Image (cartoon, helix red, strand yellow):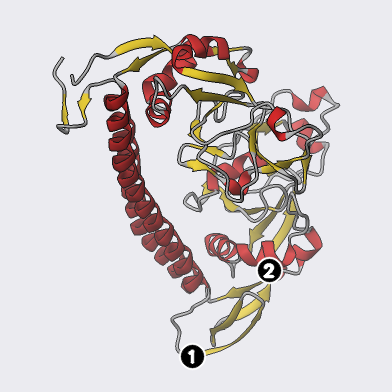
């Protein structure tokens, strides 16, 4: 090694460690607040910061940040242990961390701020946080600042810390740029996938066309028609059996689609729902407005996760958050599924109401119109969509695997560098 490496408690190389303040949020104010969502490993996401109205001087604010401060998410389960670094705000306003973040400030006489940041954000240290520093109940866990302050960290000479930090800045930036490039490619493939579905369900490649009469597509093949969906499919809805009647919730055997199932179809890969998180009983079904629908019924979520659709893979019922369509002989359910997916943006933009949770109301869905090619052509379109999607999905899966490997390489490089296993000057692993 270039110099002696010691392991010392974190509190030996910092000048401050404190939780941030509980903000008094305002629409706009003199102080920016960084919360756990804004604190990212790639830097602060300023679009997710908020503002604080202070009745004391800025210098007296708990959690007031200076460039180089390390931010550790310290409560909850979703982002606990995520480490970021503050390098300055976007508009000159002072910034504070909120009470869910621990601020760690390096003593530059002993620790290079970037080296310390990389040490605390390394996978071994993250694992240590969960193994040794978390206190509280399962759903109310938080990071113990006392245990964090006692955590041993590697400490090479200051000049070697600087070299390691400079090396990691360069290498991590290179890896991050590669990850962004691959993610951009994934996004473009998914856009192409959606465009292909739209093109196929609207007959975009046909030469002979006419005006569609539909708000979301300009023209359709001349031999297609546009119809009110209720003329070719029977529309229904769902219901929730009374929760105040315990007998309705005994011997539950009927699959029951709720908004919890939207996660199964959110990426538009899965066509059918066959399993549900909840069931209802035959007694509950008989004493509610819920309806047992046959396999092949198309469902559309119209509330909290509005716009997502699927086909029932077996006999099922739904909650009132869904509408259902049982297709007649002129409409293939899978063609309807892909048509609903292609027109999701129109459904949400034109029919959905609400700022926080979008809702599509039943009367609007009763008036819904769709393009309708001959039934044989519908089935050919579904086959073409599946074939095209399969190719894109394989490419997307391969690219996402590359992202995982790059992320693993990034973490391995950080861990090896900050623990002295990797000689950043020689660019080789050190031998034990």
Q: Which residue is mark 1?
A: 208
Is residue 257 among what the camera can see?
Answer: no
Of 294 and 162, the residue lying toward us:
162
Find residue 229 and name its label.
Answer: 2
Can you give x and y, in whole percent of width and height, for residue 44 in the image? Answer: 54, 42
Can you give x and y, in whole percent of width and height, for residue 94 in the image? Answer: 64, 40
Q: Residues within 10 Å of mark 1 (few under 14, many from 20)?
A: few
Q: Residue furthest right?
A: 244
Can you give x and y, in whole percent of width and height, for residue 324 in the image? Answer: 68, 54
Q: Tag 2, which secondary structure?
A: helix
Q: Quadrant of residue 210?
A: bottom right
Of 403 and 231, the residue lying toward us:
403
The N terminus: image quadrant: top left
Find residue 359 and name its label.
Answer: none
Can you give x and y, in whole percent of width and height, for residue 429 in the image? Answer: 17, 26
Is residue 322 among what the camera can see?
Answer: yes
| Left or right: 314 as drawn, with respect to 399 | right
Q: Is residue 247 above or below residue 148?
A: below
Q: Is residue 213 above or below residue 389?
A: below
Q: Nearer the viewer, mark 2 or mark 1?
A: 1
| Left or right: 363 as drawn, with respect to 256 | right
């Amino acid at each position: 090694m270039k110099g002696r490496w010691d392991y010392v408690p974190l509190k030996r190389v910092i000048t401050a460690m404190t939780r941030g303040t509980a903000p008094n949020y305002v629409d706009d104010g003199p102080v920016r607040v960084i919360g756990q969502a804004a604190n990212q490993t790639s830097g602060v996401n300023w679009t997710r910061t908020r503002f604080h109205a202070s009745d004391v001087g800025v210098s007296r604010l708990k959690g007031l940040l200076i460039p180089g401060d390390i931010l550790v998410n310290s409560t909850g389960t979703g982002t606990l242990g995520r480490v970021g670094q503050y390098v300055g705000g976007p508009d000159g306003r002072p910034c504070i961390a909120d009470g869910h973040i621990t601020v760690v400030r390096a003593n530059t006489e002993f620790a290079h701020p970037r080296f310390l940041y990389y040490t605390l954000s390394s996978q071994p240290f993250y694992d240590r946080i969960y193994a040794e520093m978390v206190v509280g109940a399962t759903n109310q866990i938080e990071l113990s600042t006392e245990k964090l302050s006692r955590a041993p960290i590697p400490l090479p000479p200051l000049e070697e810390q600087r070299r390691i930090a400079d090396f990691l800045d360069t290498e991590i930036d290179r890896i991050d740029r590669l990850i962004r490039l691959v993610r951009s490619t994934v996004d473009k493939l998914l856009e192409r996938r959606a465009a292909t579905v739209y093109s196929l369900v609207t007959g975009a490649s046909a030469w002979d066309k006419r005006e569609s009469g539909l708000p979301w597509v300009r023209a359709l093949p001349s031999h297609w028609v546009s119809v009110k969906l209720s003329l070719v499919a029977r529309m229904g809805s769902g219901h929730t059996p009374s929760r105040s009647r315990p007998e309705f919730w005994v011997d539950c055997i009927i699959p029951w689609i709720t908004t919890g199932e939207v996660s199964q179809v959110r990426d538009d890969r899965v066509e059918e729902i066959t399993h549900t998180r909840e069931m209802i009983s035959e007694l509950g079904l008989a004493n509610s407005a819920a309806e047992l629908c046959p396999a092949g019924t198309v469902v559309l979520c119209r509330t909290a996760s509005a716009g997502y659709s699927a086909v029932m893979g077996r006999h099922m019922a739904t909650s009132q958050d869904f509408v259902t369509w049982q297709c007649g002989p002129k409409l293939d359910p899978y063609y309807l599924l892909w048509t609903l997916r292609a027109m999701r943006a129109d459904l949400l933009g034109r029919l959905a109401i609400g700022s926080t949770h979008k809702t599509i109301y039943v009367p609007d869905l009763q008036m819904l119109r769709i393009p309708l090619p001959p039934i044989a052509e519908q089935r050919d379109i579904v086959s073409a969509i599946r074939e095209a999607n399969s190719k894109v999905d394989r490419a997307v899966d391969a690219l996402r695997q590359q992202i995982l490997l790059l992320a693993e390489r990034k973490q391995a490089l950080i861990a090896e560098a900050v623990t002295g296993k990797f000689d950043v000057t020689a660019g080789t692993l050190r031998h034990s």
